[in-house]
Image (cartoon, rainbow, N blue to C red):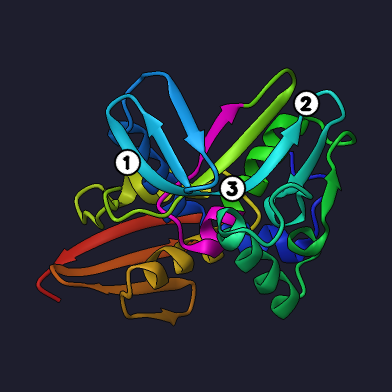
Amino acid sequence: MANGFSDQFLLEAERHSVWGAAQLETLMEFLPEAPWNADLATCSYQQGEVRLRVGVLGTYDMEGGSWLWGWANPGLGGSEAVALSAAVARYGQAHGIPEFTAEEIDLSGFDDPRRAAEMLAFAGMGVADAPGYIGQPAGPGTQVYFLPDDPKVPSAELDPVALPRVLMTGVSLIGRSPRQAVTGYFEHYGVPQRVEGDRLIADLPTGAAVVSFDGMGRIGNIQLTVGG
């Protein structure tokens, strides 16, 4: 699926893949299945009884197969509603990631343009350190992506018991670099980690997680130890 994206972008997206997948699951459980509305002038989003402060990350034109970052939207540029999107652009400039700095991205050549748009939203969420993203239809053929910017959104916790499942689910999303995905997950939670040969060892509060990689860079085994 990743045809068309730069290596810089894929590695950055991979860095957020594990914690991001867990966080999206947490956000979806938090939001009710209900009608939604947004007031961009006040950065307000409401879905059912839940009201959140949000920003506009970007929009996807399904007919044209193109993505437009919120900071490049002529109707929103410079407003508070695209402050998080603008932070993504600055990150892209600082780290040489072209997908974050191009105003508009043509996704029509991808095998699955809609999924490519979701990857852009996912990576933008990760760079902005937002607790998920929300994609909603905004008129015929247009999808708008919001980033929550509100402490009411719960954060996915690092659960040692669920760690093997969480790691394997996250690394399967992109598949560019499982090691980058695992490293990024522990970095996100501030967990000390070290590399010993083909193993990554993370020092959890309850003990240690040992993630082994095979010769092709894939996760070969995950072991949990208690008490060190």
Seen in the picture, residue 100 relative to 131 is either above or below; the reply is below
Amino acid tagged 2: Met
In the rendered image of this protein, does residue 67 appear above or below residue 48?
below
Give the image quarter of residue 159. Answer: bottom left
Number of marks in the rendered image: 3
Along the line of sight, the residue nearer the viewer: 113 or 207: 113
Q: Which numbered disc, 3 or 1, marks the residue that appears first in the sequence? A: 1
The C terminus sits in image quarter: bottom left
* Left or right side of 198 for 190: left
Instruction: Give the secondary structure at mark 3.
Output: strand
Residue 174 visible in the picture = no
Label 3 belongs to which residue?
Answer: 56
Q: Which residues are magenta?
A: 124-137
Q: Which residue is at a point 75% across and 21% down the rendered structure image?
A: 141
Give the quarter of the image for residue 201: bottom left
Q: CA distance from mark 1 to mark 2?
A: 27 Å
The residue to which callout 2 is attached is: 62
Q: CA distance from mark 2 to mark 3?
A: 17 Å
**Residue beneath disc 1:** 26
Q: Secondary structure at mark 2?
A: loop
Q: Nearer the viewer, residue 204 or 119?
A: 119
- Position of 30 with respect to 11 (left or right) is left
